[in-house]
Image (spheres, grey):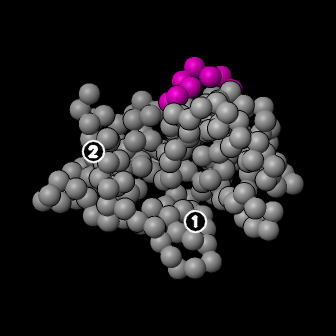
Amino acid sequence: MAVLEDMPMSSKLQARDEILSHLSPDGLPFCWLSKTRPRFCHVICANVFRFFVINDWFEKLPGVYDFLCRMLETRAYLHGSRYYKNPDWFLYNLADLCARHPQDLQLQRMRDLLLECVRERMGCNDNTLGAALRALSAQSLGLQSERDLKILLDQQQLDGGWELTWLWGYGTKDVKIGSRGVVTAMAMNAIQRALV
């Protein structure tokens, strides 16, 4: 999931302003930048929040931090979302944010909750995408998930890659977007990080 790192600031500002023009009454970002499709997804919300904090726009989304922390506290993210069935996407986005801002005291509550949630999820199933997301999340928080690394190593195929995995899907149609390449890149990243 991109956070527009290599984009010029003018493009980032344009994206920010477009997102801010499509917020729910509670100040949470909608999935679609369309007034006719007011859909919400907590995984997309986490990714938007990550983009905003990385660019020092924390204050532009005042209610989002508390919302995301409540999702962690209540474990509501475990149900997945309409678009992202795997709950580990949520943890991955937030763990990546905390890794990018390790000394940010504004994120301390989230960091503490993430440590709990990531520890609870380590090795919880043998889903390849989930194992890669959990391993990367753990590493972002200074942990190692040996169980998830073992899952990844056990599921590596003869050609060095991993099986096709569904990354996300459309809400109203049974259309799923999958990628063998993305999962392979994530798994390799997790394994390489573990060796450092």
Q: Nearer the viewer, residue 80 or 76?
A: 80
Q: Which residues are magenta?
A: 99-106
* Image coords of residue 84 (percent x, y): 54, 62
Residue pointed to by mark 2 = 188
Q: Assign a secondary structure to mark 2.
A: helix
The reply to whether discs 2 and 1 touch (Cβ–Cβ < 8 Å) is no
Q: Nearer the viewer, residue 112 or 157?
A: 157
Residue 100 part of the magenta segment: yes
The residue at the point 65 percent across, 45 percent down is 48
Kind of residue at disc 2 = Met
* Residue at mark 2 to residue at mark 1: CA–CA distance: 25 Å
The residue at the point 47 percent across, 48 percent down is 120
Q: Nearer the viewer, residue 13 or 26?
A: 13
Residue 26 part of the magenta segment: no
* Image coords of residue 115 (percent x, y): 51, 37
* Image coords of residue 5 (percent x, y): 53, 34
Residue pointed to by mark 1 = 83
Instruction: Reply above or below: 55 against 70.
Output: above
Instruction: Reply above or below: 155 against 61.
Output: below
The residue at the point 68 percent across, 43 percent down is 15
Q: Quadrant of the C terminus?
A: top left
Kind of residue at disc 1 = Tyr
